[in-house]
Amino acid sequence: MGSTVLIKNAKYIVTPDERGERTYILRDKDILAENGVIICISSSCSEVSPRGSIRINADKHVVMPAMINCHTHAAMKIFKGSLPDKEFWEWLDKIIKIEEKIITKELVYQGSKLASIEMLLNGIIGFIDMYYYPGETVKAASEYGLLVRTGPYRPDNAYAVLSRIKNYPNGYPLINIHSLYKSDPEIIDKMYTIAEEQGLPIHIHVSETRREVYLVRRKTGKWPVQYMYSNGWLNENVILTHLNWVLSSEIPLIKEKNAKVVNCPHSAMRLAEAGFCPVYEILREGIILGVGTDGSTGDRYNLLDEIRMMLLLYRHNYWDTRLKLQYLFSKIMVDTYKIFGIKGGVIKPGWPAHLSLFKIDTARHRPLGASNLLASLILSGGAEADYVMINGGLVLTPEMKTKLYTDAERVSDRIEEKLMRIVDYYEGEVIE
Ligand SMILES: [Zn+2]
C-alpha cells in the first residue's frame, strides 16, 4: 500500500465482468494501481502515472486477477506424492495414523511455507485452510504476504486460536468442522455457536464419498445436506466442500439458505471418490461456487489447473459442452473472492489491485491470440506467474524468485531429513 505500480503495455489482460458471467480480453493496455486500487486501464496510463512509480514491462505477459484457493490443508505439502494408489478411506486411515505420530508445530510451519511459495508461483494470493496448528500456517503464509482464512477445529481452544489468527494482518478467521461423520453433533453445535457469536464463516467437508453419504443416512435417516438443513446448519456463512455425492433434491436447500460450495476435482479423481459435483446445476441455481486444491492429494496447488479438471470432469460425465470455459473461468474468479470474503476477482478501475502476471511461454502457449487465450492457458496445463500483487503490493517478482527457491530448498532439506527416513510415503507407514 502507499506505492504506485504501473504495468506497462500488457500483451493481454483477462478479466471477468463483475457478475462473473463473461470474460473480457484486452490487448496492449497499461494498468495503474495507486494505494492498492486500480485507477487506470488504458493505452496511456503512463501519462497519469506519478514519478517514482514501480514500472513493470508486461509486453510478454498475460495479466489476470490473482486467485484464491478455496479449500486446502496447505501444510500437507510435507506429504507430497504420498499414498498415490490409495482410495479415499484407505488413504484417510493411513494419513491420520501418520499425522498422529509425526505432526508438530514446526512441521506445519515448514509445510505451510512450502505451500505458500508454490501458491505464489501459481498466481494464488490467498487460501482457505483446515489443519492442525492453524496459527503456524498463518505465520508462514504472512511471511510471503499471502492471505489465509483458517481457524480452530475444536471448541476447547477455539478462542485462543482465533485471537492468534487475528493478530496477523493477513489472518482471516473462520470455524473449521471436519465433517458430519467425524464430528459429534454436540461439538458441531458448539462450533456453530462460536461462529455465530463471532460472526465467522464455517468450513466443512460434506458428501465427499458415497460411503460417507450412506453413513450419515444410516445414523440420521437423512442425506448430509438435508441433515444440515434440518439441524439449522445451512446458512450464507457456510462453505460446503466437495459435494461429490449431493442429490439433485439437496441443491435447492443450498440455494434457499445461500450456502456456498467448493469442489476439488483433482483430489476427487485421485482418491477414486467418484460421484460428481453438479457444477452446471449449481451455477444455474445461482449458488456461489469455488474451487480448491485440497491438501497433499491435490498434488499441486494450482488453481488454473483445477479449473481445467472441473471442466473436463463435467464434460466427461455429462457427454456435453454446456459448461463453457469462459463462463466457468469468470464465475470461479469472482466467486472465489466472495467465498474468501474480500473484494476482488475483477480488473477494473476502483477494484483492489490483486493481480497475477503470467509470462507467455512460447513453447507451451503459442500460437496465441485473444480468441484462444483462455483455452491455451488453462487447457494446456497452466503457467508460472512472474509477478503477483496483493492490494497493489508486489509479493512476487522475477527477482524475488531466487529467494523463494532458496527458502524452498532449505525447508525441503529439513523436511526430507526429518521424514524421508521414517515415513514410507508409498505405503503410508511410519517406520520408527
Ligand atoms: Zn479437504
Image: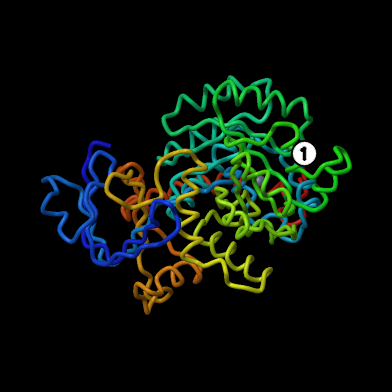
Look at the picture and state if 51 lies above or below 186. Answer: below
Residue 390 point in image, percent of width and height:
36, 44
Residue 222 point in image, percent of width and height:
82, 42
Image quadrant occupied by the N terminus: top left
Residue pushed farthest bottom?
A: 367
Which residue is painted at 43% across and 39% down in the image?
342
Q: Is residue 405 shown to the viewer in this render?
A: no
Which residue is painted at 49% across and 71% down in the image?
380
Image quadrant occupied by the C terminus: top right
In the figure, is residue 169 to the left or right of 315? left
Q: Which residue is mark 1?
A: 227
Q: Amino acid at mark 1?
A: Tyr
In the figure, is residue 358 to the left or right of 83? left
Specify few, some or many for label 1: CA neighbours under 10 Å numbering under 14, 14-19, or 20 or more.
Answer: some
Please state which of residues 384 and 255 is positioned toward the viewer in this rendering: 255
In the figure, is residue 83 to the left or right of 368? right
Residue 228 point in image, percent of width and height:
73, 37
Please state which of residues 118 and 30 is positioned toward the viewer in this rendering: 30
